[in-house]
Amino acid sequence: MSIFNKQELLDHINKIIANLRPYLQSDGGDIELIDVTPDMVVQVKLTGACVSCPFSIHTLKAGVETSLKKEIPEIKEVIAI
């Protein structure tokens, strides 16, 4: 999976998301970590204003995915479910 065990990986991802959360919340949105698949795809749920925002995919890929991959290179992708 990665250099982390599953719980360490989830904890690390949650810490990174916690640093990004204020930016999403400032626009009325939020993000919740759902899971990480065995092939290192991070599944998140966008909430609040992010659900209907036309730029949410850009935020997800350019913001969240880029930040997570920078800290944890083993991550393949971040998807909203």
Image (tube, grey):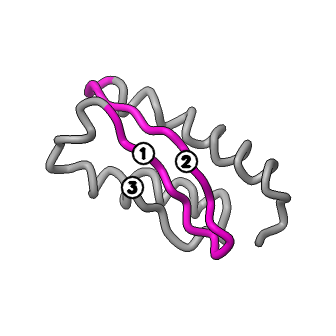
**Quick check: 77 above or below 33?**
below
Residue at image location 43% in from the left, 38% down from the top: 31
Residue at image location 74% in from the left, 53% down from the top: 9
Q: Is there CB contact under 8 Å for labels 2 and 3?
A: no
Instruction: Please give the range of residues in magenta.
Output: 26-47
Between discs 3 and 1, the one toward the N terminus = 1
Residue at image location 36% in from the left, 42% down from the top: 46
Between discs 1 and 2, the one toward the N terminus = 2
Q: Quadrant of residue 68?
A: bottom right
Residue 34 is left or right of residue 7, and the answer is left
- Reading the image, the residue beneath label 3 is 80
Q: Quadrant of residue 37?
A: bottom right
Residue at image location 51% in from the left, 56% down from the top: 43
Between discs 2 and 3, the one toward the N terminus = 2
- Reading the image, the residue beneath label 1 is 45
Q: Is there CB contact under 8 Å for labels 1 and 2?
A: yes
Residue 21 spot, x, y in % from top left: 46, 32
Q: Main secondary structure of the magenta part?
A: strand
Given the image, on which type of amino acid does mark 3 rest? Ala
The residues tagged by marks 3 and 1 sit, at their Cα atoms, a distance apart of 5 Å
Given the image, on which type of amino acid does mark 1 rest? Lys
Q: Secondary structure at mark 3?
A: strand
Please give the label number shown on residue 20.
none
Q: Secondary structure at mark 2?
A: strand
How many C-alpha atoms fall within 10 Å of the one at disc 1: few (<14), some, or many (≥20)?
A: some
The residues tagged by marks 1 and 2 sit, at their Cα atoms, a distance apart of 7 Å
Which image quarter holds the C terminus?
A: bottom left
